[in-house]
Image: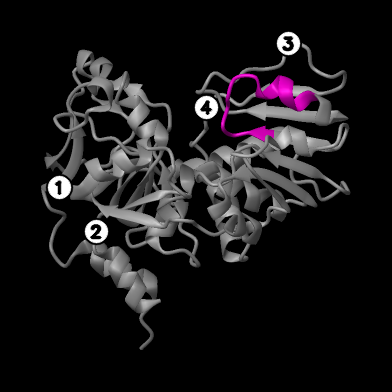
């Protein structure tokens, strides 16, 4: 008899016994004063949520830390308290196994290994979406994708938010570039979460020259991922190394003030500049004629089809995760402190359940 991974995950998800009534979860009780989370983000027991109409319950195997996670601590959670929704479970990225499905679900089944970005804009009575830093999480079925077979749960949990952000940003610039030749793409910051994915997407989608910046210790990894030229930002800027009229796309995933102006000379006449807001970045007030400028805005995590695109790239060997540091749920404060230091390579993983160790034995 052949036992499939889905059957094994289904057994684990059902747990032979019923879904527990409580779970361990990170809860945020109020805004964090100047980044001090010691009395704000704590691991406590919470009631396991139930999936509603069109929703699924995920037994969480892993999550990861995004800078937006701790940035939200500075402003979001006092507002949540005002709405009567406190304490709130944070966390965008999730991978795990479907534990239960609500009415109206037909695509996903109990036992499916899945991944998702729980950043879908969903504010209403009793509910603000997020919730990945817990043993169970609820999501709309429509936003949950089937996990790539080639990735571990931890690897998969590092990719949804950054992967969807990069995918959507590049599509705004006209990617994939299969019908164009000699496409040069600049990714302003190479070694962070969005950077390591963007380099791989640019290569997979037809860029022939991919320029980025990073500390020297990370240069070889970024070249292995697909970068053709990596600038040491301690010694120079990207723009000092580029010829005028040589660049098709600048993806400013760092979003620093003044980047658009500094990049303008390097653009071809039909180039595109796109930036992720958050660090003072903006559009150039004096752009080169013909250059398109785009403020990316916020990630749309509502469509599982885009996760399916990323999964196909991963299973084709064109997208891999970079997770050199990982923590367990109880060590969330250490993970946050490491993230806020600003020197994390790729993503910081959070391992939550035993599903991860099971996969490492069975795959």
Q: Mark 4 — residue?
A: 298
Q: Are marks 4 and 1 in contact (CB under 8 Å)?
A: no
Q: Is residue 177 above or below residue 1?
A: above
Which disc number belongs to residue 285? 3
Location of the N terminus (image quadrant): bottom left
From this viewpoint, is residue 235 visible? yes
Q: Are marks 4 and 3 in contact (CB under 8 Å)?
A: no
> Is residue 177 rendered to the left or right of residue 339?
right
Lower position in the chain sequence, tag 2 or tag 1: 1
Give the SS element for disc 1. strand
**Label 1, label 3: how many angstroms apart (C-alpha)?**
51 Å
**Label 2, label 1: how many angstroms apart (C-alpha)?**
11 Å
Lower position in the chain sequence, tag 1 or tag 3: 1
Q: Mark 1 — residue?
A: 23
* Percent coordinates x, y for residue 91 in the rendering: 33, 39
> Is residue 232 rendered to the left or right of residue 229?
left
**Label 3, label 2: how many angstroms apart (C-alpha)?**
49 Å
Q: Are marks 1 and 3 in contact (CB under 8 Å)?
A: no
Start and end of the magenta stretch?
A: 251-264
Give the SS element for disc 2. loop
* Front residue of this view, candidates 194 and 87: 194
Q: Residue at x 48, y 66 (%)?
A: 149
């Amino acid at each position: 008899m052949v036992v499939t991974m889905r059957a094994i995950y289904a057994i684990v998800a059902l747990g032979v016994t019923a879904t527990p009534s409580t779970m361990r979860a990170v809860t945020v009780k109020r805004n964090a004063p100047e980044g001090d989370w010691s009395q704000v983000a704590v691991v406590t027991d919470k009631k396991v949520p139930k999936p509603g109409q069109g929703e699924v319950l995920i037994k969480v195997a892993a999550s990861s830390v995004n800078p937006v996670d701790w940035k939200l601590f500075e402003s979001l959670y006092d507002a949540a308290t005002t709405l009567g929704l406190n304490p709130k479970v944070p966390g965008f990225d999730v991978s795990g196994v479907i534990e239960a499905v609500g009415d109206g679900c037909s695509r996903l089944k109990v036992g499916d290994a899945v991944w998702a970005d729980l950043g879908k804009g969903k504010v209403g009575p009793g509910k603000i979406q997020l919730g990945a830093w817990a043993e169970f999480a609820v999501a709309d079925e429509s936003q949950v994708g089937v996990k790539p077979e080639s990735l571990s749960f931890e690897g998969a949990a590092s990719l949804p938010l950054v992967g969807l952000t990069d995918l959507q940003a590049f599509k705004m610039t006209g990617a994939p570039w299969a019908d164009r030749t000699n496409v040069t793409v600049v990714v302003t910051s190479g070694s962070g979460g969005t950077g390591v994915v963007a380099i791989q997407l640019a290569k997979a989608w037809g860029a022939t020259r991919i320029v980025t910046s990073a500390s020297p210790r990370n240069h070889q990894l970024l070249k292995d991922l697909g970068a053709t030229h990596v600038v040491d930002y301690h010694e120079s800027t990207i723009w000092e190394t580029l010829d005028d009229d040589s660049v098709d796309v600048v993806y400013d995933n760092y979003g620093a003030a003044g980047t658009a102006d500094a990049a303008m000379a390097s653009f071809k006449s039909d180039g595109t500049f796109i930036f992720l807001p958050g660090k003072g970045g903006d559009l150039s007030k004096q752009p080169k004629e013909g250059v398109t400028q785009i403020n990316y805005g916020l990630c749309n995590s509502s469509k599982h089809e885009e996760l399916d695109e990323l999964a196909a790239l991963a299973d084709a060997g064109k997208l891999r995760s970079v997770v050199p540091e990982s923590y367990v749920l109880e060590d969330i404060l250490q993970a946050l402190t490491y993230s806020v230091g600003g020197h994390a390579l790729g993503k910081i993983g959070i391992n939550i359940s035993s599903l991860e160790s099971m996969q490492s034995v069975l795959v």
